[in-house]
Image: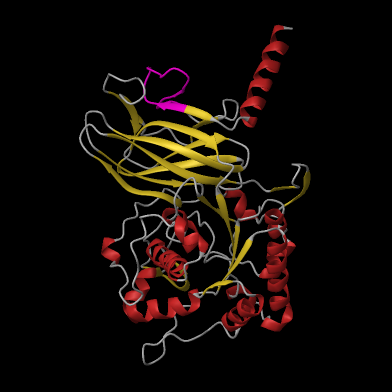
Amino acid sequence: MKNWIKILTLFLSSFLFAQQTSFKFDFGGSRTENGFIPVTSTSKFDKKTGYGFMDISGLKSVDNGGNALTGDYLTSDKPFYFSVVIPEGNYDIKLSLGDSKGTSETTVRVENRRLMLDDVKTKQGEIIEKIITVHVKDSIIRNQNGVEIGIVKLKPRERKYLHWDNLLTIEFNDKAPKVCALTIQPNKTAKTIYLTGDSTVVDALYEPWASWGQMLPYFFVPKEVVIANYAESGETLKAFEDRHRIDKIWNKIKSGDYLFIQFGHNDQKSGNSTKSGYRKRLKEWIQKAKQLGANPVLVTSMNRRVFDENDKIVNTLDDFPDAMREIAKEEKVYLIDLNAMSKTLFEAMGPGNSKKAFVYYPANSYPNQPNVLADDTHFNTYGAYELAKCVVKSIVDQKLPLSKFVSKNYKGFDLNKPDAVETFHWPESVFMEALKPDGN
């Protein structure tokens, strides 16, 4: 009888934890602030407890004494990942970073390498608080009343991703990441930017691949705006519908939210023309978004890295960018012309330097990579960051309503003067794969 009571108690506690949406975690050693859940260097993730680290090897607890919350911290000489079982939704996460007797340097990403905080340095003895706002999703489609009505048809490779797994996962990275505390609160008011698209938009899990979608959160004010990236490699407009990805969004999007739509690469490569359903679906999506009170934003597909003999970018996307431009005018919706901006950007880089923005690496640069990587479609983290700045530049230059929520991390961008790759900061994650994403 006692065993059954014990099992029932454990079940109920884990069930209640799974429904919980607010948390206070104290990172460090044995001393714990009142009202906080202790997290130590041995707190390996367990679904029964509902939180913990993906890998505890290398984790170190340091206690400097003094304040129970900020006097100790956790650190590691390699990236470490903290996960929490939590229902899907938008959350504000407050992080206490620093060392009461030293300095620190921390980069924070969430889920599939979604950039939130970059190279946050603290002075000697300084503890600072930073807030990030994160969208957590699962693959279940629910109506507005929360009733399950379907499921997103995930691809096999997506089941390894960190953003369909019913967890919030936070990556702490950089030269000296030191985390003292972490609190989580639901955010019911932030405007949500839903991203739809292909491998050039998706939150890519594996180094060296990346997209502009996963860099975008860095440029928006937390608490006010949150990025919800639903893009996936290899998708066309039709496939996005067939796999019920757009149905997931239709049942979540609220009045005042945004729907960014970027398709073209795979629609074109699959042999379709702009007349074989592309225009029709785009217009249907626009009308549906408007009916729901959301703001549709069309994003033309960026160019591939294909130059002519005069070092000018060649259009390899047929009339897909033009079709999107025309529909934006016809439907009177916002347009971010990433196609035109990328042409200027890549030509400014030139044929040689532009390789530094794409996945061009010698053999054996990454694990299980016996061959050279030379990809003129997909971007590395530097290229993805530059394209994200293009998107933000368009929002600011056109004075879209979203422009008032652009953060101070965006300091303007001259397409003719790209950032030097040598100045780009990106400590690599532990997830690496040489396999090219779906699509081209």
Residue 40 shown in magenta: yes
Q: Of all residues shown, which one is farthest toward the left?
A: 124
Q: Which x, y percent locates residue 355?
A: 37, 73
**Main SS of the magenta segment?**
loop
318 versus 32 height, above or below: below
Q: Position of residue 321 (x, y in %)?
A: 57, 80
Whether 273 is drawn above or below 174: the answer is below
Q: Which residues are magenta?
A: 25-43
Q: From this viewpoint, which residue is outermost toward the bottom?
A: 309
Q: To which quarter of the image does residue 173 belong?
A: top left
- The number of numbered discs placed on residues in the rendered structure image is 0
The reply, left or right, for residue 274 in relation to residue 337 is right
Task: Quadrant for the C terminus, please.
Answer: bottom right
Residue at the (71%, 11%) spot, across then down: 5
Q: How is the image coloured?
A: secondary structure
Give the quadrant of the N terminus: top right
Q: Is 294 on the left or on the right of 352, as rendered?
A: right
**Residue 215 seen in this snapshot:** no
Q: Nearer the viewer, residue 292 or 21?
A: 292
**Image spot of residue 113 (x, y percent):** 46, 51
Q: Where is residue 115 shown, x and y percent of the image?
A: 43, 52
Residue 117 among those drawn in magenta: no
In the displayed structure, 307 sits above or below 362; it is below
Residue 220 vertical placement versus 132 (above, below):
below
* Relative side of 172 to 88, left or right: left
Query: Nearest the camera: 128 or 119?
Result: 128
Left or right: residue 71 compared with residue 437 = left
Quarter residue 180 falls in: top left
